[in-house]
Amino acid sequence: MLDPTAVLLVHAGATWFMTGLIWFVQVVHYPLFGRVAEDGFVAYENAHTRLTTWVVGPPMLLEVGTLAWLSWTPTPAAGGLALGVGAALLALIWISTALLQVPRHQELSTGFDGRAHRRLVTSNWVRTVAWSLRAALVLWMVAAEIGVGR
């Protein structure tokens, strides 16, 4: 049987990785889409989508998997309300990805469109804020779990 504290630490690592990555994407990567030359944009967007999947897929699955595991075997600090709020934020992230960001990438896969680009950058704030809140929540859970402040 896995140690619940170890699972919490893996969960925290996945969440913090994704939080750092989403801030990079929000502040640097997505805004720079508008500077890619028009004749190379479709290839750029398609490469972005293909390669990004390899970077975000494993930690996103690890994050949801460890959250599910913690939901079945909570730690004293990572249980109840904290896990519920974390799960709601993660659901919001996945729903936003499926309903807001993926469709914008599909629009951009046929060529640069300023409106689709603006909607991608603007809608991505949902994930950026949600992951930031998750990072703070998970930090609080880890701190409570290891006894910081007792």
Image (spheres, grey):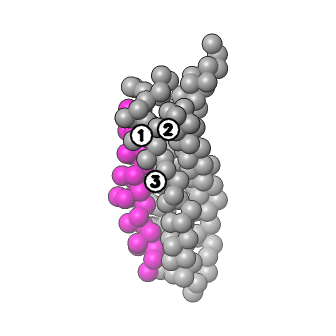
Label 1: few (<14), some or many (≥20) within 10 Å?
some
Secondary element type, mark 3: helix
Residue at x 50% of width, y 33% of height: 4
Distance of mark 3 from mark 1, alpha carbons?
A: 12 Å
Question: Looking at the rendered structure, which numbered label has been put on residue 111?
Answer: none
Q: On the image, numbered disc 3 is attached to which residue?
A: 61
Does the magenta segment cover residue 125?
Answer: no
Q: How many marks?
A: 3
Residue at x 47% of width, y 80% of height: 111
**Above or below: residue 58 compared with residue 136:** below
**Above or below: residue 106 compared with residue 142:** below
Question: Looking at the rendered structure, which numbered label has been put on residue 69?
Answer: 1
Does the magenta segment cover residue 86?
Answer: yes
Range of residues picked out in magenta:
82-110
Front in this rendered view, residue 13 or 52: 13
The three-letter code of the residue at mark 1 reads Trp
Question: Looking at the rendered structure, which numbered label has been put on residue 2?
Answer: 2
Secondary element type, mark 1: helix
Q: Is residue 136 left or right of residue 61?
A: right
Residue 52 seen anywhere in this rendered image of the structure = yes
Mark closer to the chain start, 3 or 1: 3
Task: Tell me whether the residue at label 2 lies in contact with that at label 1, contact meaning CB atoms closer than 8 angstroms.
Answer: yes
Label 2: few (<14), some or many (≥20) within 10 Å?
few
